[in-house]
Image: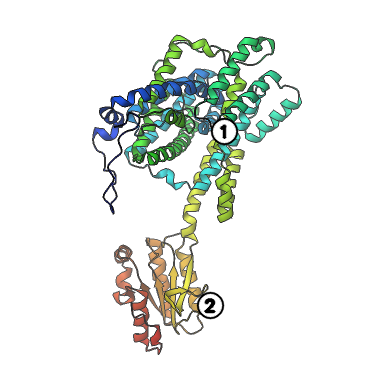
Amino acid sequence: MSDSTPAPAAPPEPGRLTRPGKTTGWRRWLPGLVALRQYEIAWLRHDLVAGLVLATVLVPVGIAYAVASGLPAISGLYATIFGLLAYALFGPSRVLVLGPDSSLVALILGVVLPLSAGDPQRALALAGMMAVVSGILCIAAGSARLGFVTELLSKPIRYGYMNGIALTVLVSQLPALFGFSGQGDGLLTKSLAFGEAVLAGKTNGAALALGAGTLAVIFCLKRSKRLPGVLIAVVGATITVAALDLATRAGVPVLGALPQGLPALAFPLITSGDIVPVLLGGVAVALVSFADTSVLSRTYAARAGSFVDPNQEMVGLGVANLAVGIFQGFPISASASRTPVAEAAGARTQLAGVVGALVVAGLLMVAPSLLRNLPTATLAAVVIASAIALIEVKDLRRIYRIQQWEFWLSIGCMAGVAVLGAIEGIGLAIVIAVIEFLWDGWRPHFAVLGRVDGVKGYHDISRYPDARIIPGLVLFRWDAPLFFANAELFRDHALDAVAASPTPVRWLVVSAEPVTSVDVTAADVLEELDHTLHAAGIDLCFAEMKDPVKDKLKRFGLFSALGEQRFFATLGQAVSGYIKATRVPWVDWEDKDG
């Protein structure tokens, strides 16, 4: 076996696929111990090196996201340390790196800023409780195997939400980039306040130069796998400030010394008036962090040809958030910027994350004042670079070309986040997702069918104007489940199809293959439709209805009321039955294969 990669699994027999088995017992809950039992000593060197490289990025990024979230800088390092350690034990992915993330900055800030009133300890308690709430929700959902829930958010909605978050975070960091404190709560207010401050001459030229230089270095080295752009930019800015004493001589805002040592275990305490916003924020964090984590986890698992249980992924994320919440941290998520660093550095398992966490802990124990001259403009630049990386443009262009209404749906979701705020924005995203999910079933496609020469089967007469219809017979297809929201629409369109027939109708046959379910409301509407048609001398029949749907009609009593003779296995059999029952001389309509 090579010392660089795990041995590849034997290829499956041609014509077969190997699917992962269901993990049970303690192995499901503690995948980190399972990985440790299978650990190979040849991987150790790679994990140690990757952990050291990773630590150089974890420190400045963790601090930057803490400051951007309105929290003490040290909390970003606490969140990094305990998040990585907890995930290494409970998380299923071998290379995923968890920590403070730009996608959560606006959510945390939206709760912390208005409630903390500038008190850093109260801000930390609020953010810590958000992490606890998020952690409990993720653990509960993962235990109940609800890891599929984030799949309900479509790609355009996810793009819109994340673009809105990125825009919000970017605007919130502009004042720090320019060397002054920002004002305002919402995106528009912050933008106006920033513009007024710049026009009033509050910009600190030295701070702006440092921030702009940081951005330039990060973007120039973005594609380099050997040169860590964030680390180089942060170290360069810190050395520049210290060497030129810019904090004193030019008034450049700097980080200051960090507290020494590790945090004590402390459950975050909030007031009764904080409960609702913290709960809402925790729910939003759970949704966004798991959506990010599951996508990133599946991506890296696919690259490695392995499988990651999304339910255990949710549990691992939940435990990690719970841990950082009780150790004076704030909500965390998988990182799309630090995970590639670990992978590129040669990480083989989560031991790389553990090493990175221990190095950060060592820094706090031994040299907490090492970054005291780090300018806040540089931290703002780090966050801005991450926010820009969140913005999706290329795929939205593709969506615009192929389906414009989904593009505008994404833009509307982005505007909702930008105008209403991050917490309200995710609520809007969920509402839009539910509406989008229901729309196809609420207003589905339907068609009257006919026979087309040279084309087998029955087809939409609106698409085939030359299609032949048999006198007295309407074949009506409904391309959706029948449920309370569309039942009356189904009835109306079915009656419209009968009324539009060029000849008096004797049978209405519903092509029911696309109908995957019927609820009580829809069954009652079907009964009303049957009565309406019967009064006009028309029989209501069904073809190709699935057995589970028939079983429901039997429970509702509608199957026996209509009679088994009105249900046909195929459309061809329904047509043949109509011809035989009515003696219509259209023998060429009979489906010989039906």
The quarter of the picture where the C terminus appears is bottom left
Which residue is painted at 65% across and 10% down in the image? 244
Mark 1 and mark 2: span between their CA atoms? 53 Å
The image's mark for residue 427 is none
In the rendered image, residue 84, in percent from the top left (x then y), is placed at 40, 25
Q: Nearer the viewer, residue 520 or 149?
A: 149
Residue 448 vertical position relative to residue 344 in the rendered view, above or below: below
Residue 200 vertical position relative to residue 413 in the rendered view, above or below: above
The residue carrying mark 2 is: 465
User: Which of disc 2 and disc 1 is earlier in sequence?
Assistant: 1
Q: Is residue 333 visible?
A: no
Q: Nearer the viewer, residue 54 or 328?
A: 54
- How would you rate the neighbour count of disc 1 (Cα within 10 Å): few for under 14, some for 14-19, many for 20 or more? many
**Amino acid at dot 1:** Ala
**Amino acid at dot 2:** Pro
The residue carrying mark 1 is: 387
In the rendered image, residue 187, in percent from the top left (x then y), is placed at 63, 34
Judged left or right of residue 344, residue 7 is: left
